[in-house]
Image (cartoon, helix red, strand yellow):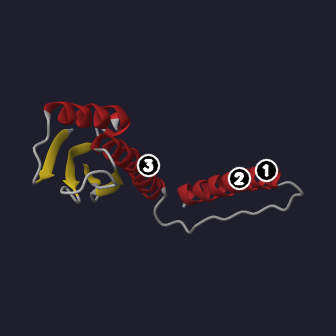
């Protein structure tokens, strides 16, 4: 995973650069094999004024075989903006990868399968509907294989 840091009109201190790289590597470690490049864009929104939420971080990750995923965060300090944007990016990446895996895992040529169950408790209804869905899906796959 290649990490690139860009700063619009700023000199990025080595300590901040190291923090950005460590934070990305630590938080995105589960996705590092899938990522080809991660771009970090830092910007001081109103550099002339002190205080306030004026540090902006935009991070764009490029997972192999998928469209880029981006997340951003504004904070009063760059470290906080980077950390929060990285956490948002990790969630967005996981969502995109999960969605991609579901689409890839779905057997071709099969219609969607649905199941429902009424129960007095929500947890029991979800559990029973899940069991029904598993059985219906397995039946559909078995039937598809025999044809």
Asked which quadrant contains residue 144, the reply is bottom right
Whether label 3 touches label 2, CB < 8 Å: no
SS class, disc 3: helix
How many angstroms separate mark 1 from mark 3 (CA)?
25 Å
Compared to residue 147, the image places residue 98 above or below, namely above
- Circle 2 sits on which residue? 130
Q: Which of marks 1 and 3 is in front?
A: 3
Mark 2 or 1, nearer chain start: 1
- Circle 1 sits on which residue? 123
Check disc 1: other Cα within 10 Å, few if <14, some if 14-19, many if 20+.
few
Task: Pinpoint residue 119: horizontal percent, then vertical percent.
Answer: 87, 58
Q: In which quarter of the image is the N terminus?
A: top left
How many angstroms separate mark 3 from mark 2 (CA)?
25 Å
Task: Pinpoint residue 34: horizontal percent, then vertical percent.
Answer: 29, 42
Task: Pinpoint residue 87: horizontal percent, then vertical percent.
Answer: 40, 44
Q: Residue at x 29, y 37 (%)?
A: 24
Mark 3 or 2, nearer chain start: 3
Q: Nearer the viewer, residue 111 or 63?
A: 63
- Circle 3 sits on which residue? 91
Mark 1 or 3, nearer chain start: 3
Q: Which of marks 3 and 2 is in front?
A: 3
Q: Which of 48 and 3 is in front in this view?
A: 48
């Amino acid at each position: 995973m290649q990490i690139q840091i860009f700063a619009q009109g700023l000199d990025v201190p080595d300590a901040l650069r190291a923090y950005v790289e460590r934070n990305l590597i630590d938080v995105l470690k589960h996705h590092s094999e899938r990522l080809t490049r991660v771009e970090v864009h830092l910007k001081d929104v109103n550099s002339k004024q002190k205080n306030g939420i004026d540090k902006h971080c935009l991070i764009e990750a490029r997972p192999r075989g998928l469209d880029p995923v981006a997340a951003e965060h504004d904070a009063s300090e760059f470290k906080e903006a980077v950390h929060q944007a990285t956490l948002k990016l990790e969630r967005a990446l996981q969502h995109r990868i999960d969605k991609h895996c579901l689409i890839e895992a779905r057997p071709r040529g099969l219609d969607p399968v649905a199941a429902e169950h009424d129960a007095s408790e929500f947890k029991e209804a979800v559990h029973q509907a899940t069991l029904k869905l598993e059985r219906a899906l397995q039946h559909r796959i078995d039937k598809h294989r025999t044809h």
